[in-house]
Image (cartoon, helix red, strand yellow):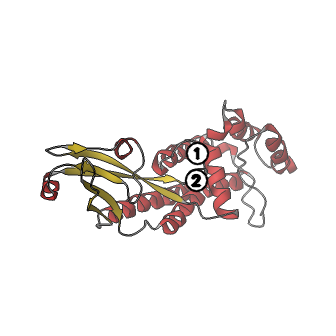
Amino acid sequence: MVSNLDEARLKLRRGKEHLYMLESESRQFWDSNVYTLIHERNGEEFPNLLRFKMLKPPPQHRWGLILGDAVHNTRSALDYIAWRLAGSDLSDRYIQFPICESSDQWKRFQWRFEKGNRIHPDAFAYIRSVQPYLRPNPKIAKLWLLQELDARDKHKLITMTQVITRAAHIGGSGQILIPYAAVESNIEDGAVIIEYADPPEACMNMEIKFAFRVTFERGLLSDVEDIEVGACLYPVFEAVDIIIDNFESRLDWFPS
């Protein structure tokens, strides 16, 4: 009988470490003077502008590679469990933990589990119970997000990210105009942050702080909203953690 699921836990831990690395690198990036505010004259009612300017782009491909490692290690933790359930045969290249969006997909996976009655029926029933296709909206189920991200990274393209820049605080004295887009939408490179009527020296008294978030590239997981990487992956990690806990509490499901 399997005495523990240390390998699965180590793979999940490694997935988390990659996400911690991404968060650390993104903080270091934004703390390294990668943007500036440029003063311009435009001759309008508010003749002075402060414009947001990026000095170097975020390392999106590197961050995408780190994300791919985070996702793949987490997905592998589940596959380790399935392999243990099936008898820990080193020549077994086919068994994997199924993550299915539809009942048809689940039926196509069944033969791998039922072949030779290799997996304990209670373990099989539990695996079915966590399937995304049994959820009201399978496409936002945590395991399905994991499956999609892993499949795209392995078989299609590097998981790309984008940076959402928002004005966390804008303040100052004198006549100033803050464009609606500066506080209500993503601040793009070259966006005007403030227009003001005071002489240029007045900008020295202005307080402007930005907040930066790393999100999945629009269209990857959603076409209508920006999904923050951490907000997506931490619940996925938690879901996999729970699955490992449940299997470790039933080690009698594993072959002796």
- Residue 25 position, x and y percent, is 38, 64
Q: Which residue is mark 1?
A: 248
Q: Amino acid at mark 2?
A: Leu
**Residue 1 visible, this orientation:** no
Q: Quadrant of residue 104?
A: top right
Query: Closer to the camera, 53 or 87?
Result: 53
Q: Are marks 1 and 2 in contact (CB under 8 Å)?
A: yes
| 193 is higher (above) or lower (below) than 155 | above
How would you rate the neighbour count of disc 1 (Cα within 10 Å): few for under 14, some for 14-19, many for 20 or more?
some
Q: Which numbered marker is on residue 99?
A: none
Using the numbered discs, state the Cα–Cα distance from disc 1 to disc 2 in whole angstroms. 6 Å
Question: Residue 222 occupies which quadrant of the picture?
Answer: top right
Q: Nearer the viewer, residue 228 or 9?
A: 228
Instruction: Please tell me which residue is depicted at 73% across the width and 44% down the height of the picture.
Output: 100
Residue for point 12% across, 58% down: 201
Residue 248 location (% of width, % of height)? 58, 45
Circle 2 residue = 5
Residue at image point 51% right, 58% down: 161
Residue 115 place in picture, x, y as percent: 86, 50
Q: Residue at x 54, y 46 (%)?
A: 236
